Amino acid sequence: MKLSIQKIFLVCFTGWFLTGCQDLLNPKPNNILSADIVLTSPDDVPQVRIGLYNALRGTAALSVVAGDLTADLAIHNGTFTVYNELSNKKILSTNSAAATFWAGVYNVVYIANFIEERLPGLAGVSTTDKNHLLAEARLLRGYAYFIGANTFGGIPLVTTTDVDANSNIGRSSKEEILAFALEDITQAIENLPDTATTGVGYATKHVARAMLARYYLYQSDWVQAEQFATQVINSGQYLLEPNFNTIVTQDFTRESILEVGYTITDDPGTSTYGLNNIFVGRREVIPANSFLLKIFSNESGERNLTVSFDVRNQRGNDNGFSVAKYGTSDEDNNNIVLFRLAEMYLIRAEARARQGKLTGANGAITDINVLRTRAKANTIVSGNQSDILTAIENERLYELAFEGHRWYDLVRTGRANAVMTTFSSNWKDTYNVWPIPQIEIQRNPALRGSQNPGY
């Protein structure tokens, strides 16, 4: 079994935070505040910290579902309506994945708010320890708001644990949410450690910088995206694995910056949103044929190890291929990677290409070829800016497939409609964001009449 003691810390308190996920903007105070999260003595601090990271896990699988099944990497192959809607581009506001993802985002927000409200006045905890946990809370809240805004558009900005206030709060704009997220992430850096003594399951300054690199990429701030990606690359804390297959078959690799881990007792593999369950066990979702044509190209090289083939599965519309990146609870690849070093090279390559920095040691081509060389793929010699940007789009598909990036990439670059209308005749502008879950509109009067257009 892969987990050491330091990694078990991340996963041993699953039960007590999950019970509050369902009623996220209007939590039951006797449930969450009194029973599930207690912060009345210094002894409670480690458990609350673990609860914060467990809440982050609640967003991980759904970010993969959103990023890759809303796009063109995968198709539905089973019986679950939730995946059929996403695959066939007939997404409804009642889609349970949307509701569960929304709940996951606000569970992180709620616990972070709880820490921010309760921790400063708690006696018996050193200022250093308080500042550290507050930084982690703000960082993960900022990340939750970042993925929430890029998934749903404008969403409620919840900054307290006040039940009455949170039960009737309207949407802030996407720009307002992202500005809040940026402030959270930026403020967190100062009080985060340079290295994590408890493993890559916990935040450090470099985790925050990796988040900022992605944030600024999404904002088209190429200078800042290049700067923060370079800081992470040059930190020396992370190393590209020599073989791409290591990324597929192992957890907590040397290039992992932040990932969420599981043990044999809490592996999500059999749940509706467990990645091994939907990709391998039930085969609810399989790689799309158009994706397979790309991943088996000479430009991809060994990145085709992301998928596996079994002729016994090849029947009807089933092409026989499966996603290989997520194993079962007794295998060494059931974690979900949120940030890794290869993405930093891709962020820097795109940022440099957008600035016209194409060649030389500090050019986009060099960064692309670092990953292609690792994958034993054809390298790039030259090209104009348009060619290089196309290569980077494809490189992100090869390298980051089934890690939850594709749909977000297509939307942020304005390429979604061009790519997706070719993939599916049902695609429309509506699907550049997910719907506000209907159940949240029913619960929260301030959300009524503010559904995303087309849903």
Image (cartoon, rainbow, N blue to C red):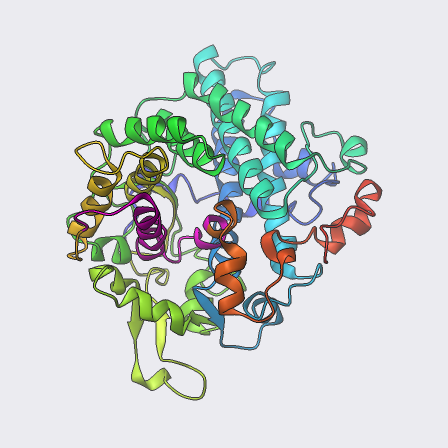
Residue 124 or 304: which is nearer the viewer?
304
Q: Is residue 71 visible?
A: no
Determine the main secondary structure of the stretch shown in magenta.
helix
Q: Position of 369 compared to 107: left or right?
A: left
Q: Identify the residue shown where x is 71% and y is 59%.
A: 93
| Residue 401 in view (yes/no) | yes
Q: Which residues are magenta?
A: 380-409
Q: Position of residue 399 (x, y in %)?
A: 30, 53
Residue at 59 percent across and 51 percent down: it is 101
Tell how many labels: 0
Q: Quick check: is 337 in the magenta stretch?
A: no
Horizontal and vertical percent for residue 315?
A: 40, 88
Question: Which of the 4 quarters of the picture holds residue 118?
Answer: top right
Most foreground residue, 295 or 204: 295
- Residue 411 in percent (x, y) is at 52, 49
Give the quarter of the figure containing the N terminus.
Answer: bottom left
Question: Considering depth in this image, is 399 or 145 the residue closer to the camera?
Answer: 399
* The quarter of the displayed image where residue 158 is located: top right
Q: Residue at x 68, y 35 (%)?
A: 173
- Of all residues, the one furthest to the front in this rendering is 384
Q: Position of residue 182 (x, y in %)?
A: 52, 27
User: Looking at the rendering, in which quadrant would you find the C terminus?
Assistant: bottom right
Decide: is 279 above or below 438. below
Let me know if residue 401 is in the magenta part.
Answer: yes
